[in-house]
C-alpha cells in the first residue's frame, strides 16, 4: 500500500476531473492498457452481479475469471461500499 498522502493526492486528482474526456485522458496517461482493461472488466462484473447475473453468465459475457468475479462479489457484499454507491447512481 502506498503512502496515505500519495493516495490522497491521486483521489483528489480524480475528483477534479470534470468530463469523460478529461477522465479518459488522465487514466490513459496514468494506467497501462492492461490496467485499464482490468478496471473496466471489474466494473462490468460489478454491474452484472448487481443485475443478478450468475458467475457462469458473467464468465461467458465478460470473459472474467471466477477469481475476479469472486473478488468483486466479495467487495460488493463486504467491501467499503464503493461499488454499491456507484451502481446506485
Image (cartoon, helix red, strand yellow):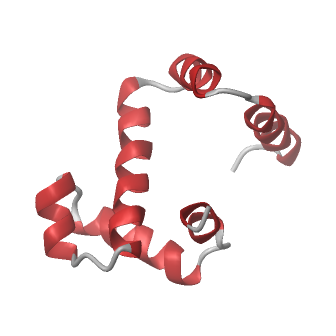
Give the residue displayed 58% in from the left and 28% down from the top: 20
- Which of the two residues, 62 or 88, is positioned nearer the viewer here? 88
x then y, percent, for residue 63? 17, 53
Q: Outermost residue, bottom direction? A: 77
The quarter holding residue 30 reads top right
Q: Residue at x 29, y 67 (%)?
A: 67
Side of 5 where 65 appears, left or right: left
Q: Quadrant of residue 7?
A: top right
- Give coordinates of residue 10: x percent, y percent: 76, 35
Residue 12: quadrant of the picture: top right
Q: Is residue 26 above or below residue 3?
A: above
- In the picture, the quarter occupied by the C terminus is bottom right
Task: Pick the residue in front: 25 or 88.
Answer: 88
Would residue 71 appear left or right of 30 to someone viewing this image? left
Count the numbered circles shown.
Answer: 0
Give the residue drawn at x 36%, y 37%: 37
User: Residue shown at 51%/75% (left/top)?
Assistant: 76
Q: Where is residue 85 drawn, in percent x and y? A: 64, 67
Q: Is residue 84 above or below residue 16?
A: below
Amino acid at each position: 500500500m502506498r503512502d496515505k498522502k500519495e493516495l490522497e493526492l491521486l483521489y483528489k486528482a480524480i475528483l477534479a476531473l470534470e468530463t469523460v474526456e478529461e477522465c479518459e485522458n488522465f487514466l490513459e496517461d496514468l494506467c497501462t492498457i492492461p490496467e485499464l482493461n482490468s478496471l473496466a472488466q471489474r466494473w462490468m462484473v460489478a454491474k452484472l452481479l448487481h443485475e443478478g447475473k450468475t458467475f457462469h453468465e458473467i464468465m461467458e459475457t465478460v470473459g472474467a475469471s471466477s477469481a475476479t468475479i469472486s473478488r468483486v462479489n466479495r467487495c460488493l457484499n463486504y467491501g467499503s461500499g464503493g461499488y454499491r454507491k456507484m451502481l446506485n447512481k
